[in-house]
Image: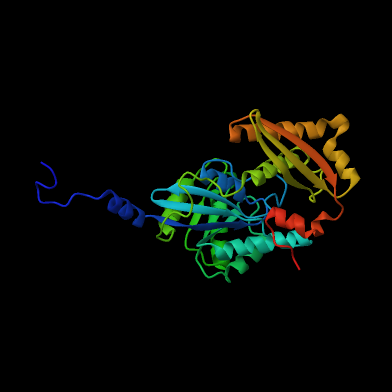
């Protein structure tokens, strides 16, 4: 018997879609914390794929990077912000300003604390800064598998004394422990409304910028302590061909001595960096990648407003 035979009104596909859309939630969650707290690792874990680079070098994340996840009927846009620390240079100042800006613009703020490092002066300063934000915050304790349970409880108590948190979550960003409960909470906490990005998007980062970030990651991983913090990668050219993608990138350093470090003996270092970056980019793009790296000396580039615009940062005045 049909719906008409029963005297019922048949469902209209458009109305059904509107009803489903009205049940949806979407919003922004800012991940803030001290440098190397594990924000990028956590975002990659929650999104389910790599959208932010991860290295042992502090202040790896420089600009705001957004990772997008769909959980239940909610789209959660994670905002990976630069680590918050006491700025010493213009680049530091721009990064810290960007981090707090990302927190103010979000629907919810998540403070990530590395359990092994605890609450030092840098984290205390962030906790005090949270009081100026208008919306609620949650506390996420990371690396819970590295410290005793008693330490976790003491750390939770101290953090909640210094700032007001709606909830506290204990996770291992690397292993994914505790992330399911966190995602359930975040999905329910997002404002009602339509999705902000296409449902299958995982990031809003342009491929040219992501490619530069991947090369910068390989640069840091390869050299780490040898290379000063003041280095930068830009994608200068991107050409699609029938043989794949040709990508030309510039690695900016401040001195000739740094250029020699990046190139390495007989070009071995730059070749290793290029090979590692090319392999990852080929996996992401699912096509052959021909990557060409050029090391350029630009003295005092950290005071060049153009470089800040390329990184998505506002040049400090």
Give the quarter of the figure containing the C terminus.
Answer: bottom right
Tell which of 25 and 289 is nearer to you.
289
Q: Give above or below for 192 relative to 253.
A: below
Please tell me which residue is depicted at 60% across the width and 61% down the height of the picture: 102
Quarter of the image where one finds residue 314: bottom right
Tell which of 71 and 5 is nearer to you.
5
- Residue 247 in percent (x, y) is at 71, 37
- On the rendered structure, is 49 left or right of 239? left
Res. 54 visible in picture: no
Tell which of 250 and 32 is nearer to you.
250
Res. 52 visible in picture: yes
Quarter of the image where one finds residue 156: bottom right
Give the quarter of the figure containing the N terminus.
Answer: top left
Q: Give above or below for 188 relative to 136.
A: above
- Residue 233 in percent (x, y) is at 75, 46
Please tell me which residue is depicted at 87% across the width and 53% down the height of the picture: 299
């Amino acid at each position: 018997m049909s719906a008409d035979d029963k005297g019922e009104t048949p469902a209209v596909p458009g109305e059904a879609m509107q009803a489903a859309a009205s049940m949806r939630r979407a919003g922004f969650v800012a991940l803030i914390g001290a440098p190397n707290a594990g924000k990028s690792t956590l975002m990659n874990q929650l999104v389910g794929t790599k959208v932010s680079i991860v290295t042992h070098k502090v202040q790896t994340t420089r600009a705001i990077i957004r990772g997008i996840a769909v959980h239940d009927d909610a789209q959660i846009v994670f905002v990976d912000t630069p680590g918050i620390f006491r700025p010493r240079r213009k680049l530091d100042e721009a990064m810290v300003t960007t981090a707090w800006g990302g927190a103010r613009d979000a629907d919810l703020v998540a403070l990530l604390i590395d359990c092994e490092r605890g609450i030092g002066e840098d984290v205390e300063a962030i906790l005090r800064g949270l009081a100026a934000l208008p919306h609620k915050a949650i506390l996420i304790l990371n690396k819970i598998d590295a410290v005793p349970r008693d330490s976790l409880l003491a750390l939770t108590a101290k953090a909640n004394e210094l700032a007001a948190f709606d909830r506290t979550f204990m996770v291992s960003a690397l292993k994914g422990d505790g992330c399911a409960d966190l995602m359930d909470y975040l999905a329910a906490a997002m404002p009602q409304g339509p999705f902000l990005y296409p449902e299958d998007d995982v990031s809003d980062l342009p491929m040219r910028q992501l490619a530069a970030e991947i090369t910068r990651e390989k640069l840091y991983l390869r050299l780490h302590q040898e290379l000063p913090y003041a280095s930068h990668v830009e994608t200068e050219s991107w050409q699609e061909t029938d043989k794949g993608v040709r990508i030309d990138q510039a690695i900016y350093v401040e001195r000739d001595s740094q250029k020699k470090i990046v190139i390495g003996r007989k070009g071995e270092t730059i070749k290793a960096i290029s090979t590692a970056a090319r392999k990852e980019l080929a996996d992401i793009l699912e096509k052959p990648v021909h990557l060409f790296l050029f090391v350029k000396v630009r003295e005092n580039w950290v005071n060049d407003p153009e470089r800040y615009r390329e990184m998505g940062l506002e040049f400090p005045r």
